[in-house]
Image (tube, rainbow, N blue to C red):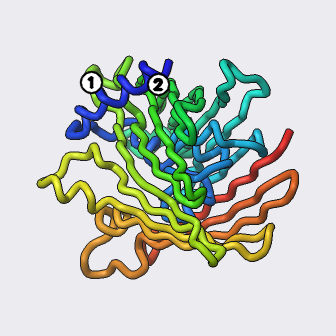
Amino acid sequence: MKKIVLLGFILLSFTMDSFSLPVFNFLNDVSNARAAGLGGTYLCVENDLQAVFFNPASLATVEKNDFSFTFFKQALDINSGNVSYLLPYQWEDGKISVNAIYTNYGSFNYIDKYGVESGSFSANDLAFSANYSNILDSNFFYGVGIKYIFSNIEKYSSSAIAFDFGLLYKLSDNRTNIGMSILNAGFQLSSYDGAVEGVPLDVRIGFNHHLKGLPLLFNASFNHLSDKTNSFGDKFKSFSIGGEIYFGKYVQARIGFDNHIRSILTNNIDKGLSGFSLGAGINANTFNFDYAMSIFSNSLTLHRFTLMLNI
């Protein structure tokens, strides 16, 4: 298994210049509230079940809260979310989780050329996945995942299969983690109109660090490294940073910045606070609750809520 994982990383590294169309672009929106509050830099976070969406290697570090649910209110009637469950048994001392991601785009009316309504239809995106994570070596973890992806609108649909790979290394200072992940490496099984489209491959590298003498966890990562760019240096413009400060044992506050949002989704004239995010969390003995607001533009701020439980 360990040799297969390392071989997978070597082979998939050659796909970093690939280009994919956005039929399954909802996979890029997967995020829990804590991650959103940190600007989406979540590659090296430990002991958080929903970190598996960013780096499946993090699953091996989960010690509590074996169930999590996130609700994400988007614009108009669009709602998204994800669910994760840590299975109560292990395989070869490794941990296994099952997960689901969804986006519902609301209801649409059938209207003919005369403006007469005749019923309605819906559109949805779904992905079901399973992840496995274990120790590769001392303080070195790996994770793999497989997901089935489905998208439909009215009577039309498309499906795909994809794989995730992740590595997480904890330095000997016990305050610094380094990680890498390759997400959504896959292919389409069926298409809407016969034209084959890609799955949105995402390659990420990053680190986090607990500051000495200060209750702050600093996170940073480069994201979307597989996207097509005009130059190699442009790949590193898609970065995110975030800080989490602890107020005692149970309360955290977060701030983050995602340069990808700021550079892609807003114009150069009126950027405002686009790309910035804020969040807060409460950690109790039996549950965690997190909230985050992400600023996409002066007129669009999105909110996420995450609940994690021991069941």
Give the residue pinned by disc 1: 196
Q: The residue tagged with tag 2: helix, strand or loop? A: loop
Q: Is residue 106 above or below residue 74?
A: above
Q: Is residue 196 above or below residue 223?
A: above
Q: Is residue 259 above or below residue 50?
A: below
Residue in the image at 29% along x and 26% along y:
11
Position of the C terminus, as image quadrant, is top right
Residue 99 percent location from the top left of the image: 63, 33
Mark 1: which amino acid? Answer: Val
Question: Relative to residue 243, is residue 233 drawn left or right?
Answer: left
Question: Relative to residue 194, is residue 278 drawn left or right?
Answer: right
> Which residue ends up furthest to the left in the rendered image?
230
Quarter of the rendering containing residue 35? bottom right
Residue in the image at 39% along x and 81% along y:
272
Residue 301 seen anywhere in this rendered image of the structure: no
Q: Are marks 2 and 1 in contact (CB under 8 Å)?
A: no
Within-10-Å neighbours for mark 1: few <14, some 14–19, many 20+: some
Question: Relative to residue 76, is residue 267 drawn left or right?
Answer: left
Residue 41 percent location from the top left of the image: 48, 58
Quarter of the rendering containing residue 38? bottom right
Residue 80 percent location from the top left of the image: 58, 47
Question: Relative to residue 309, is residue 8 drawn left or right?
Answer: left
Of 12 and 6, the residue lying toward us: 6
Q: Is residue 311 above or below residue 172?
A: above
Within-10-Å neighbours for mark 2: few <14, some 14–19, many 20+: few
Give the residue pinned by disc 2: 155
Residue 130 seen anywhere in this rendered image of the structure: yes
Mark 2: which amino acid? Answer: Lys
Query: Which of label 2 and label 1 is nearer to you?
Result: 1
Q: The residue tagged with tag 1: helix, strand or loop? A: loop
Residue in the image at 69% along x and 42% along y:
62
Sequence-wise first label, 2 or 1: 2
